[in-house]
């Protein structure tokens, strides 16, 4: 399975905000995250980096 | 394996530009893509959407 966890970078720490993310849509200063079950979370920020092998989506505020 | 293919959206078409992408770093109007072998490609644009279950990274110009 290829779902990832989403993290928000706060200073030099990563705060895990969502598990099993399957889609990521950045739009107008927000990032829309959707998980395996179809639940959505919207966070202020932009995509900083994506590491598929580490299953990490990192968002900066 | 969780690598994906990267596509650039041109009008209503998706042009496949890289296979086996493992990391994605958007920065200052460019998207830096790195594949399994460590090769890098830099494209003008921003991340439009990521569909992990379809292994698709879509960049809009």
Image (cartoon, coloured by chain):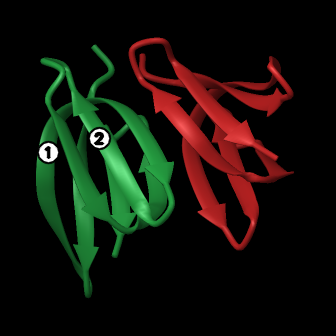
Chain colours: A green, B red
Labels 1, 2: front one: 2
Residue underneath mark 2: A33
Up the image or down, A10 lies above or below A20; here it is below
Whether callout 1 and callout 2 share a subunit is answered yes
Camera-side residue: B4 or B11?
B11
x and y, in percent, of residue A26 in the image: 47, 50
Does B25 sit left or right of A13 as displayed? right
Q: Chain of mark 2?
A: A
Q: Is residue B32 left or right of residue A12?
A: right
Q: Which corner quadrant of the image does residue B28 belong to?
A: bottom right
Find residue A59 and report its horizontal and vertical position in percent.
36, 62
Q: Position of residue B9 (x, y in %)?
A: 78, 30
* A27 up-or-down from A38: above or below: below
Q: Residues within 10 Å of mark 1 (few under 14, many from 20)?
A: some
Mark found first going from the N terminus, 1 or 2: 1
Subunit of label 1: A
Residue A52: image quadrant is top left
Element on which disc 1 rests: strand
Q: Nearer the viewer, residue B34 or B7?
A: B7
Label 2 near label 1: C-beta < 8 Å? Answer: yes
Left or right: residue A59 versus residue B47 is left
Q: Quadrant of the N terminus of chain A?
A: top left
Residue drawn at x 27%, y 72% as measured from the top left: A9
Q: Residue furthest bottom?
A: A11
Comparing B9 with B22, the one in front is B9
Which residue is found at the position 82% from the left and 47% from the top?
B61
User: Which residue in the structure is indicated by mark 1?
Assistant: A18
Counting from the top left corner in percent of width and height, residue B35 is at 66, 35
10 Å crowding of disc 2: few (<14), some (14-19), many (20+): many
- Residue shown at 59%/31% (left/top)? B57
């Amino acid at each position: 399975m290829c779902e990832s966890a989403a993290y928000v970078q706060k200073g030099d720490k990563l705060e895990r905000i969502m598990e099993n993310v399957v889609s990521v849509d950045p739009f107008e200063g927000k990032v829309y995250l959707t998980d395996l079950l179809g639940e959505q979370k919207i966070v202020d920020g932009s995509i900083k980096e994506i590491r598929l092998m580490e299953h990490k989506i990192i968002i900066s505020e």
